[in-house]
Image (spheres, rainbow, N blue to C red):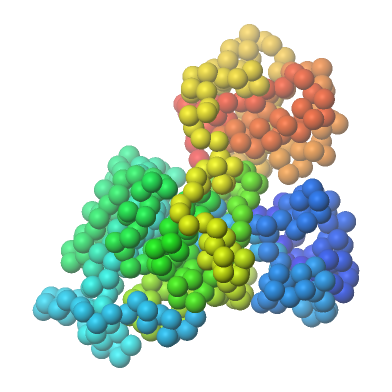
Amino acid sequence: MPTISIPTALRQYVGGQAAINVQGDKIGAALTSLTAQFPDLKKHLFDANGKLRNFVNIYVNDEDIRYQQSEDTPIKESDEISIIPSIAGGAASEAEVLARAASPELNKEEIARYSRHLIMPEVGMEGQRKLKAASILLIGAGGLGSPLGLYLAAAGVGRLGIVDFDVVDHSNLQRQIIHGTKDVGRPKLQSAKDRLSDVNPHVQIDGYELALRSDNALEIIKDYDVVIDGTDNFQTRYLANDASVLLGKPNVYGSIFRFDGQASVFYPKGGGPCYRCLYPEPPPPGLVPSCAEGGVLGILPGIIGVIQATEAVKLIIGQGEPLIGRLLLFDALKMKFKELKLRRNPECPLCGDQPTIKELIDYDQFCGITPPVAQPPVAETSDWEITPVELKQRLDHGDQVTIIDVREPNEWQISNLENYGSRLIPLGQFADHVNELNREEEIVLHCKMGGRSAKAYEILKKAGFTKIKNLKGGILAWADQVDRSMPKY
Ligand SMILES: [Zn+2]
C-alpha cells in the first residue's frame, strides 16, 4: 500500500500519525482514501468544490503533481507521497550574477580575522573582498535572524540591514540566541546591533525599527544585494517575495514549525521560481498555526537560519550550487533532509510569462487579515466576547458558567482555569464533543489569545448554541488582568 507523509501541522487531524497507508493507483484515489479515513482533514486539503487548495502542494517523490498529471498522476507502492503545506522559510553560473569584481581591500586585522576563509581556494582574498563589498537585508531579528546575523557578521559581510520593531521578551530566549537575558524589554534591533558589533566591528549595521510594508519595502530593499526572509507571518513573506522579485534580488527563504523546517532561494532573475510559484495563495488566517500557537523546537531556527546564511554567502562569493529551484525540507525528529524540485510557474502572477502583479499590493487584504483600524478599541468588547475581569466577577458572584479550554494538553499543563471548573477540549477534537455540552448552560470558551476559541465559538454557533462567549485575549489576558501569579508562555 502506498503511504502519504503527513506534515506536522496537519497531524492533529490524523490522530498524530506521521504517515498513513492509503489505497489507489493514482494520487486522486489515494487522497480520497486518506480523507475517507480522516474526514476532518478534507477541508484542509480541498475547497468547497472539491479542488485541491492552492496552499497545499502534493509531491510524488521529488516532483510536484502540478507538473505531472495532477490528481491523475499514477503512483506505485514504493513511491513517497508528501503533502507540503505552506508554513508561518540553479547552478553556479546563476550565482555568478551576483559576484562582482570591485571590492574593498582588507586591512591587517581583517586578514587575521578571516584567515580560515582566506586559505580556502573557494573563498580566498577575492571571495572575502566580495563579502566585504556585499550587503544583506535580514527581515526579522528573531529565531532565524539570530543565527543569520551572528554568522553573517562573523563571516565579514560588509553591510547588514535588519528590519525589526519587536521588543525582547522572556519567551524569545529559548531560540533567539542573539539576545540575552539582560536584553529583555529592550528593542530587538538595539540588542542585535550591540551583539553583532561585538562579534565584528568591521560590519556596518543599519537598523529599520519598523514593520516592512508595501509603502516602504521597495525603498529599503533596493539598496541590498540579497534579501533574507526570517519572518513569521504570511503578509511579510509575500511582501518580501514580491518586492525581491520586482527588484530582481535573490530572496533566501526559511520557515520553521515545531520540528519541521523549509529552505530555498527564490530568484526568478537567476532562473528559478518565486514563493508564489510554490504557493500562489496564503492559507486563510488561523488555519496554519503560528509558532506562538503551535510551538517550535528552540534549536530548529538555528539549523534553518544557518542554511540560509550558507546560501547567502554562496550567492555572494559565487560558489557552489544554490538552492534555486529546490525546496529543502528538514525533519528534526527523524533527522532527515529531503529535497523537492521547484519550477517556475509560467502562470505565476508575479514572475510568470504574463505577470499581472507589477507593484506591491495590500498584503493584509491578500492574506485575509482585517486591518486593526476596523477593530473595536481594546477596552470595548462586542457582545460575543467577555473580558477576563467580567468573567472573574461573574464567577465570584457564583454565576453558573461552564468554561471550556480549547488549547492543547501541554498548554493546559502550563496554566489553566481548573479551579473554576474549566474543561479541556482541544480545538482539533472540539466538533466531536459538541453533543456533550449543555446548550442551556452559559459557556465561556478560551484558548491562549482568543483565536482558536473564536473558531470553537463558530462551531457552537452553527450547532445552534446561543449562550456562548469568547474570553477576550484568552488565558494570557486572564494572567495580565486577573491573576498576575499565573505563568505566561
Ligand atoms: Zn513566481
- Image height of 488 relative to 76, above or below: above
**Occupied quadrant, residue 467:** top right
Foreground pick, 347 / 266: 347
Q: Which percent across, then down, holds residue 444?
A: 68, 24
Residue drawn 60% across the image and 74% down it:
343
Quarter the N terminus occupies: bottom right
Residue drawn 20% across the image and 78% down it:
103
- Whether residue 392 is visible here, answered yes or no, is no
Total count of labels? 0
- Image height of 345 relative to 441, above or below: below
The single residue placed furthest to the top in the displayed view is: 397
- Image height of 44 relative to 75, above or below: above
Q: Which percent across, then down, holds residue 255?
A: 52, 60
Q: Which percent across, then down, holds residue 331?
A: 60, 67
- Image height of 365 relative to 485, above or below: below
- Whether residue 407 is visible here, answered yes or no, is yes
Q: Which percent across, then down, holds residue 140?
A: 39, 53
Residue drawn 37% across the image and 55% down it:
218
Residue drawn 28% across the image and 80% down it:
100
Q: Is residue 209 left or right of residue 334?
A: left
**Occupied quadrant, residue 450:** top right
